[in-house]
Image (tube, rainbow, N blue to C red):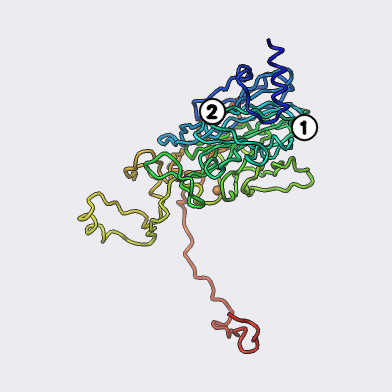
Amino acid sequence: MPTDRRSFLGAAALLGAGAVSRAAQAAVPEAPTQASPLTQPPLEPSAGRPYNPVVTLNGWTLPFRMNNGVKEFHLVAEPVAREIAPGMVANLWGYNGQSPGPTIECVEGDRVRIFVTNKLPEHTTVHWHGLLLPNGMDGVGGLTQPQIPPGKTFVYEFTMTRSGSFMYHPHADEMVQMAMGMMGFIVVHPKDARKMKVDRDWCFLVAAYDIDPGSATPRVMTMTDFSLWTWNSRVFPGIDPLVARTGERLRIRMGNLTMTNHPMHLHGAVFEVAGTDGGWVPKSARWPEVTTDLPVGAIRAIEFNADLPGDWAFHCHKSHHTMNAMGHGVNLPVGVDQRDMLGKLRRLMPDYMPMGGAGMAEMGDPRMSMPLPDNTLPMMTGQGPYGPIEMGGMFTVLKVRDDLPRGSHADPGWYRHPPGTVAREWTGPLPASVEAPAPSMPATLDAVKPGGSGHGGHQH
Ligand SMILES: [Cu+2]
């Protein structure tokens, strides 16, 4: 019987991404699902060549089974309920219980067979972004295969020809299916475990959702004005910290499936882009960075040494991407003294709370918290050891510690700064303010307007 199964699977694979018959269903591997939105411990390889497994930020890795030397995986495309951060759950589409789907992890040279069951209300496919594979396995609906109808299982089979960082997502009704959260990471480790070796290796995908406060389903037609900027479908303070031990070599692999770029900025370390979805970057072609742009539809794998202990911010540098559900139509009354209006407004709206006259920092203070609609998140939030962090969206903390147990991924809590090393109020004398000397340039300049009658050729 097992021989029959194996030979049938071989035949199914030769047919390409074809529907699996009922006889083959019996041989389809289990499709584990994940209930937790928290970062799961790395999945040590159960068979095949050894590797140092990745940690999927607020995610998990899909277990595989060996079948005659082929690594078999089973993805189930389905509607999921994803906790974006404590206090908000979104109705998304994903794989195996979560959005993003589980990370698929294997080794250069591995033969893989990936079963995809469609439990969505519409057809789908899976495209393996960045992998070099036979054209019929590329997962572009209509072009390289028929779409996978609801209720059907297709099988993809190919060889992982190169190591690196890749991703999977549908190539069928893409605008809807990616806006709903269908995506996952693929990590292919080098055959030689000594090559590109790091001590810790994280991965995540960047996605944007437009979910109205009080609702739970993304508006899939949105093109630019998203309300939630997520890493692995999580926002700060729901994004777990990245934990490392001083002296370790670290890698963070980031993929962008939003419709805009993200300048990713890391404090407390200098990194190099060591890989893209095109492969590893030769050492001679790298340069030092503290911010790197993560373009649309691309992956950047950054590497650095954790030299400095501390709690180091790691975030997108677009300040609107480190905010949660914003009302972009709100007028920010910086510089407006609202005190004299207060009496008049309170007569109309007894609960009216004037905010923003001195900036918006007070919105990060939980004592100033206003009632929010159900199932939404404060725009600026998070409490640190010294007060409100006033962030949201694409923000987390790299926690580097001298005393972290080797291999531990547990959150060590806030950094304890050595005495005398924290910025503090200056209580000594201050110099009297002096006026800067006036510039020596003439106060007025005679400007000559270009153009005029001599430029008859220009029509405006
Ligand atoms: Cu961004």
Image location (x, y in percent) of residue 291: 63, 48
- Relative placement, left or right, of 160 versus 64 is right
**From where the camera sits, is residue 421 visible?**
no
* Residue at image mark 1: 195
Quarter of the picture containing the C terminus is bottom right
The secondary element bearing badge 1 is classed as loop
Q: Residues within 10 Å of mark 2 (few under 14, many from 20)?
A: few
Kindly identify the residue that appears in the image at 22 percent across and 59 percent down.
344
The reply, left or right, for residue 253 in relation to residue 233 is right
Q: Does 26 sit above or below residue 57?
A: above
**Residue assigned mark 2:** 151
**Furthest-top residue in this view:** 1
Residue 324 image position (x, y, % from top left): 45, 45
Point 59% across, 84% down: residue: 449
Considering depth in this image, is 460 or 398 the residue closer to the camera? 460
Which label is found at residue 446? none
Using the image, determine if residue 362 lies above or below residue 94: below
Q: Is label 2 within 8 A of ligand 1 (CB to nearest ligand atom)? A: no
Question: What residue is at 58 percent from the left and 85 percent from the top?
Answer: 446
Instruction: Measuring from the top left, give residue 223's x and y in whole percent.
Output: 51, 51
